[in-house]
Amino acid sequence: MKDLPEFLDPQRMPRHVAVIMDGNGRWAKKQGKPRSFGHAAGMEALRGVVRASDDWGVSCLTVYAFSTENWVRSKEEVGFLMNLLLRYFASELDELDEKNVKIRILGDVNGLPGPQKKACENAMARTKDNTGLNLSIALNYGGRAEIVRAARELARRAAAGEIDPDAIDEAAFSGELYTQGLPDVDLLIRTSGEMRLSNFLPWQCTYAEMVFGDTLWPDYTRELYARDIAIYQSRDRRFGGVKTQIGDKA
Ligand code: FPP
């Protein structure tokens, strides 16, 4: 664990942090710049949070980069975000791999344009045996679609006689989600003053602690990330039962 701020308790770090990186457009608008400017700055903020997660021993970081609903944005903005994804991998993949980061894409990769699909598949294949930070990037992702996809797969296997419908439990269902094998989200962060889940990890966030702040995503720093983790550490997590200390096994 490197450079962990002293006000954070290393024993009570969230295992899985999910981030809705919101406010890029408003950040750009405030400076009279096009929305794309905000997304490019947002990518820099993402770099900082990935580094901090790696330094501080957060084992899973999941970020919302592009939802299934985002396709309705202007052709220019969608094109810019798709290019940014290629730029992200081109500039970061070597360092991420070196740092033992395992990349996974959550969402329908087949629905991405060819070069983006290839870049995602390459990033996942190259880092698949890494054992450090699990960095998941939600791309062309929708939470309800993810749940329907899991239900469809379980139904298909039940119809084929491969599984007993009565044996389908929460663990079996979790095993069909894009996040298969990852722990549930402990801490959900959303920037820019919005307080919604917006179809992001609805199953996985069932017991997540949510922290909403006013900062626009491009202004989100390592210090603000530490503050949000401190807010998480100050909460009592009860999971529907009695008081537990964060860091205890639920
Ligand atoms: C929400 O802000 C942000 C997005 C839809 C895109 C998030 C993308 C990045 C942070 C870029 C880096 C990521 C990768 C991996 C390419 P908004 O545009 O909805 O802002 P607004 O609500 O102010 O309009």
Image: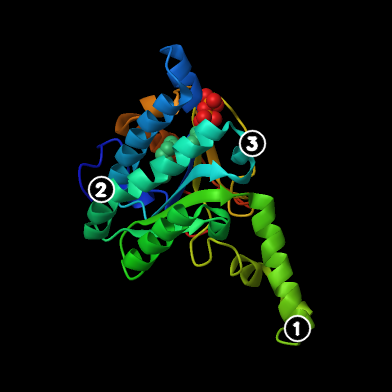
Dot 2 and dot 1 residues touching (CB under 8 Å): no
Dot label at residue 65? none
Q: Is residue 195 left or right of residue 106?
A: right
Label 2 and label 3: CA atoms lie apart by 37 Å
Crowd around label 2: few <14 · some 14–19 · many ≥20 (10 Å): some
| Secondary structure under the numbered disc 2 in the rendered image | helix
Q: Is residue 178 left or right of residue 234?
A: right
Does any portion of residue 220 appear in the rendered image?
no
| Secondary structure under the numbered disc 3 in the rendered image | helix
Instruction: Residue type at mark 3: give it.
Output: Val
Dot 3 and dot 1 residues touching (CB under 8 Å): no
Crowd around label 1: few <14 · some 14–19 · many ≥20 (10 Å): few
Residue under the image location 34 percent in, 44 percent down:
87
Residue under the image location 29 percent in, 35 percent down:
7
Q: Position of residue 224 (x, y in %)?
A: 36, 29
Q: Quadrant of residue 51?
A: top left
Instruction: Residue type at mark 1: give it.
Output: Asp
Q: Is residue 84 left or right of residue 66?
A: left
Q: Is residue 69 left or right of residue 227?
A: right
Q: Nearer the viewer, mark 3 or mark 1?
A: 3
Crowd around label 3: few <14 · some 14–19 · many ≥20 (10 Å): few
Q: Which residue corresponds to mark 1?
A: 164
Q: Position of residue 52 (x, y in %)?
A: 29, 43
Q: Nearer the viewer, residue 221 or 238?
A: 221
Q: Which residue corresponds to mark 2?
A: 55
Queried on whether the Cβ of the residue with tag 3 lies below 8 angstroms from ligand 1, the answer reads no
Q: Which residue corresponds to mark 3?
A: 72
Dot 2 and dot 3 residues touching (CB under 8 Å): no
Instruction: Residue type at mark 2: give it.
Output: Asp
Label 3 and label 1: CA atoms lie apart by 40 Å
Q: Is residue 249 above or below residue 61?
A: below
